[in-house]
Image: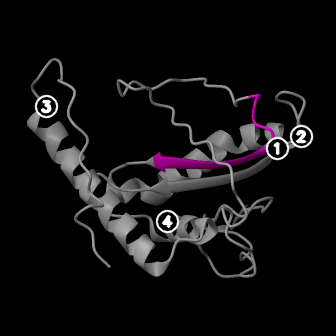
Amino acid sequence: MESRVETEVEDSIGFKSNLGKFTAPRAQSSQAPLLESADDWKVQFDVNDEGVSVKERPFPSEIAVVSVIRIELTSPWEENLTKKHFEKMDKYKKLAIDLREGKHHGVKWTVVPLCVEVGARGAINEQPWNWMCKRLGFSKCSKRRLTQGVQDAAVACSYYIFLCRFLRTWEPQALVDTLERSEC
């Protein structure tokens, strides 16, 4: 089996070779996009209206369809893209297992973990990013626009952090629509 970055195939098992390389089974290409049959979505973020992270947010018990598609975005320095990918996968592995076994609200959930990394200078960890776009059913044009948009946002955020590096407090900033400028 060739070496490759582990994809978030549900119920897959990743292996570490004696050379320290991670391998994973190849995903079946016949998988339908996750959102193809969805007609009722609820999107949640772990950030509140003021942009402050809300930790330990429980899964909502009022959701009737017990499926969770979790997209975890990490923005590390480019040299750490793959390392951070595996750290995030490991961090949430127990939660995914607990949800699948019904240890939250007594209901067994279908969990699809998608961990993606966009570096501080706009580089993307290609394999997890492509996997997420494929699983969500994005067209080539949508994927290209989204990719360009997140890369632009990462660069803009890094630049803003650099400009504010000597400030003790930061003022809230208006959101910037990076997708508006992206074309196919």
Circle 1 packing at 10 Å, graded few (<14), some (14-19), many (20+), is many
Cα separation between marks 4 and 1:
24 Å
Circle 2 packing at 10 Å, graded few (<14), some (14-19), many (20+), is some
Between 38 and 152, the one lying in front of the other is 38
Q: Position of residue 175 (x, y in %)?
A: 26, 41
Q: Is residue 67 left or right of residue 103?
A: left
Cα separation between marks 1 and 2:
8 Å
| Residue at numbered disc 3 | 165
The amino acid pointed to by label 2 is: Glu
| Residue at numbered disc 1 | 109
Mark 4 and mark 1 lie on one chain; the one further toward the N terminus is 1
The amino acid pointed to by label 4 is: Trp
Contact check, label 3 and label 4, Cβ < 8 Å: no
Q: Residue at x 63, y 40 (%)?
A: 91
| Residue at numbered disc 2 | 101
Cα separation between marks 3 and 2:
45 Å
Tag 4, which secondary structure? helix
The amino acid pointed to by label 3 is: Arg
